Image (cartoon, helix red, strand yellow):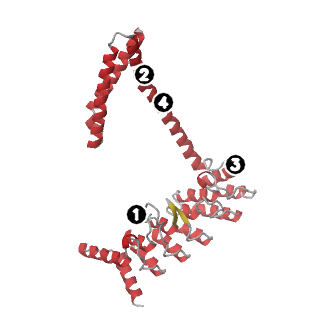
Amino acid sequence: MKAITIANWSFLIIYGILLTYSSLTLNQSGTDAAGRGMAAGYLFVGFILLVILIGVNCLPFQLSRIIVFVLGLLPIVVGLIHWMGQTSMSRQTRQNDDGKANGTYYFHDPQRRQLAQAIADHDIEQVKMLLQQPIPQLNESGSDYITLLDFAALKGVYSQDSLWVIPCLSLLLAKGAAIETADSSHIPTHTRVSRNSSAVLMDWFLKNGANPNAKGLLQLPTPILFIVMEYDYDREEKIKLLLAHGADPNSVYPPTASSWLAGHSALLAATRLELWDVCRLLLEKGADATVVGPQHQRFADLIKRSAEIYTERNNTPETFTALLKTMSASAGK
C-alpha cells in the first residue's frame, strides 16, 4: 500500500505540473480566442478533478487510494494505447504511400506488380519486354479501381515531364489495355487524370479513342468538361480539344449533386466561374445560350451583370471583350 501511495502522489504532482504549465502557456498556443476559451474550460475542469483526487487520496482508506491509483494510471494507459494506434496508422500510411508509388498497393499478382514497378522506374524497355507475355488481368481493376493503364497515366501526370509516359501508354494500348473497362466502378483513364494532365496528354488520349463525353466522379458521375473546367492547368487547351473531338457543349452538371454548380449547363458554369475564354469556345461549338439554370439564371443576365461590374471598376479583361465580340458576331448572323 505504501508503494501505491507513493505512486499516487507522483501521479498527482506530475498532473499538477502539466496543468500548471498548460495554463501558463495557453496564450502562446497560437489558437484563436474560441479555442483558448475551450482549452481554459478543460483546464478548469482538470484542476477541479485534481483537487478531488488529492482529497480522496488523503482519506485513510485503502480503497480510496486504490481508486486514485487506477484513475491516475488511466491517462497513461489511454495515452499509450493512442500512441500505439497513431504509430501503427503512420506505419500503414507510409506502407500505402510506398505501395501506391510502386503499384503494390493496387495490384496483388506478380505480373502486374512487375509491370507497375517498371512503369514507376520509367523503364520503357522493361515494360516492352514484360508485355511480350500474356497479361490476363491487364484490364482488371485493382485497389481503388485502378488499372495498369490508370497507374501509368497517374505516374505520368504527377511527374515533372509527363511526355515520358506516352510511349508506355502506347505499349499498353497495343497490348489491349482499355481506357474504359467493363467495370462499372472504373473511371475512364483520361477522365481520372483530366484535372492534372497536360493538353498534350489529353490530345493523345482523345486521338486514341477516349470518349470526350466520359464522366468522372465529383460526388456523382460528372461530364469531363466540368472536371477540366475547375482546375486551371492547360484548361482552355484541354476544353478546346474535348470540344473538337465531340464533347457536348450543352453538358449539365448533375442536378442532385451538393455542389453549387449542380444543374448548371457547361456555359452557365463557365460564366459563373468567369472563364470567358471557355464561354467563347462553348458558344463557338453551339452551346445553347438560352438555357435557364438554377434560380432562373440566364447567360445573358450574368454577362450583363459582369459587364456592369467591369465598367464600374474600369478593368474589363481582354477575354471578356473577346467573348462579347463572339456574341455580337453570332447575333449578327
Left or right, 135 with reference to 216: right
Q: Which residue lies furthest to the left in this view?
A: 312
Can you identify the residue that label 1 sits on? 260
Quadrant (top left/top right/bottom left/bottom right) for the N terminus: top left
| Residue 131 found in image quarter | bottom right
- How far apart are the alpha carbons under marks 4 and 2? 12 Å
Give the residue at the far bottom of this rendering: 333
Q: Is residue 246 above or below residue 254?
A: below
Camera-side residue: 242 or 297?
297
Residue 60 x %, y % = 34, 9
Q: Residue 81 carries which label?
A: 4
The amino acid type found where label 1 is placed reads Trp
Q: Name the residue under label 2.
A: 73
Ranked by sequence position, the earlier of labels 4 and 2 is 2
On the question of residue 199 being in view, the answer is yes
Q: Is mark 4 on a helix, strand or loop?
A: helix
Q: Do the residues labelled 3 and 4 touch (CB within 8 Å)?
A: no
Residue named by callout 3: 109
Q: Residue type at mark 4?
A: Ile
Distance between the Cα atoms at labels 1 and 4? 42 Å
Residues tagged 1 and 3 counted as in contact (Cβ below 8 A): no
Residue 263, image x and y in percent? 44, 68
Upstream in sequence: badge 1 or badge 3? 3
- Depth-wise, is mark 1 or mark 4 nearer the camera? 1
Question: Of helix, strand and loop, which one carries label 2?
Answer: helix
Which of disc 4 and disc 3 is earlier in sequence?
4
Q: Looking at numbered disc 3 in the image, what kind of residue is underneath it?
A: Asp
Measure the alpha-carbon separation of dots 3 and 4: 35 Å
Q: Callout 3 environment at 10 Å: few (<14), some (14 to 19), or many (20+)? A: few
Identify the residue at image location x=49%, y=59%: 219
